[in-house]
Image (cartoon, rainbow, N blue to C red):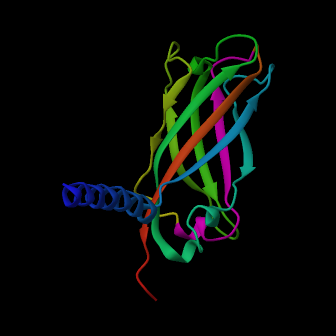
Amino acid sequence: MKNLILSAFVIAATTVSCGTVQSIVQNTVPYTTNVLVSSGVPGNQEISVTSSATSFAQYVGAGTSMVQDIRISSAKATATNLSTNGELGIFKSIKVYLSGNNTGEILVAQRTDIGSNIGNTLNLDPDTSKILDQIVKSGSVKARVAYVLKNTATNDTNLTISMRFSSIPAPNQ
């Protein structure tokens, strides 16, 4: 009976640790940026806001040289309004670009033709074909959110863009 319990414990511990190792190896990295859309922002005009990301090295342990093939895996926009429920229907389009030190900008996620009654959460269309190694490994990642409103904003709205990135382990060097 003791051996059966001990065996079950070892199997359970191995299963849990394998899942943990797989999560670490896959390196799914979250990143969130916030944009304030102020009352009075004009409609039908592209507005851009840029923010710096925290160091991606803190997520991948010893450094970004341990991973490769870094790609965006998902992106979501969430709106909250300070006076009413947030509504993404005020947006005509939302685009998210990433850049790094001495790198060009890459469009990583977007959504155009946003419906009027979409609610306060919207999945953006990520471009999973783009490899972002050069940007992420540059040391300073910047996100630029470009949006177009359908009409002039009548209330302040907080727009949160949540992105997740995936990677694979780099071969031993």
Q: Is residue 129 magenta?
A: no
Q: Is residue 136 magenta?
A: yes
Instruction: Please report the residue visible at 40 percent of the width from the left and 64 percent of the height from the top.
Output: 21
Q: Is residue 146 left or right of residue 49?
A: left
Instruction: Please report the residue visible at 60 percent of the width from the left and 38 percent of the height from the top.
Output: 161
Residue 128 drawn above or below residue 160: below
Residue 50 in the image: state x and y as whole percent.
73, 47
Residue placed farthest to the front in the image?
1
Residue 76 drawn above or below residue 40: below
Residue 84 drawn above or below residue 102: above
**Residue 151 or 108: which is nearer the viewer?**
108
Residue 61 in the image: state x and y as whole percent.
58, 69
Q: Which residues are magenta?
A: 133-153
Residue placed farthest to the bottom in the image?
173
Instruction: Please report the residue visible at 34 percent of the width from the left and 58 percent of the height from the top.
Output: 13
Q: Is residue 4 left or right of residue 86?
A: left
Residue 156 in the image: state x and y as whole percent.
77, 20
- The quarter holding residue 14 reads bottom left
Instruction: Please report the residue visible at 65 percent of the width from the left and 40 percent of the height from the top.
Output: 146
Q: Is residue 170 left or right of residue 153?
A: left
**Residue 111 or 151: which is nearer the viewer?**
111
Residue 90 in the image: state x and y as whole percent.
62, 19
- The quarter holding residue 81 reads top right
Image quarter of the N terminus: bottom left
Q: How many marks?
A: 0
